[in-house]
Image: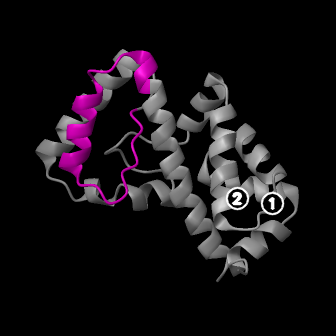
Amino acid sequence: MTEPPGLIAFNALSDARAVDLLVQCCSSTAWARRVAAARPFPSADALHTAAENALADLTEPEVDAALAGHPRIGDRADNPSSAREQSAVASADDEIRARLRAGNEEYEQKFGHVYLVCASGRSAQELLDVLHARLGNDAATERRILRTELAAINRLRLDRLLGENGD
């Protein structure tokens, strides 16, 4: 099996350029450095595994740095990846958007960080339902869930990165 062209290009990047691109996938520089240092990858699956392992090794402050790169669900996205992933929320009606804003505030007051969910392919109502369900979690459970959600977001963004490098 041969490497996809985007992976070949990614493996050939300088460490600094690889880290720069990875930080666009996940704003934790510690994560980006760990993933870049694990190159070359023989497959996209190997890249995904390295990314998941790097995420699992992050300290809580490093996870907080990763969260800082994600806007609230329903807020104006400050980067193209978040805008693409939250596109269903942009077209939601005013009532759902208002309920998402209120839910985000409640979540942040309870947990001390942004509500993180892999929004890609999900409706605004589904994201609101997930938010309300997660408000019932304790802090430790919620930290585990947000790492799972962050891993899913990172995976989508890494796949897009490989596709962009292959163009």
Numbered circle sitting on residue 21: 2
Residue sitting at x 53%, y 35%: 67
Tell me the crowding category of disc 2: few under 14, some 14 to 19, or many 20 or more residues within 10 angstroms, Cα based.
some
Is 150 left, or right, of 134 in this rendering?
right
Figure quadrant of residue 83: bottom left
Residue sitting at x 35%, y 44%: 75
Numbered circle sitting on residue 145: none
- Can residue 23 be spotted in the picture? no
> Looking at the picture, which amino acid does disc 2 mark?
Leu
The span shown in magenta is 115-142
Q: Position of residue 106 (x, y in %)?
A: 28, 22
Figure quadrant of residue 145: top left
Residue sitting at x 39%, y 42%: 117
Marks 2/1 in contact by CB < 8 Å: the verdict is yes
Q: Is residue 164 above or below residue 36?
A: below
Tell me the crowding category of disc 1: few under 14, some 14 to 19, or many 20 or more residues within 10 angstroms, Cα based.
few
Per the image, label 2 sits on a secondary structure element best described as helix
Per the image, label 1 sits on a secondary structure element best described as helix
Residue occupied by mark 1: 17
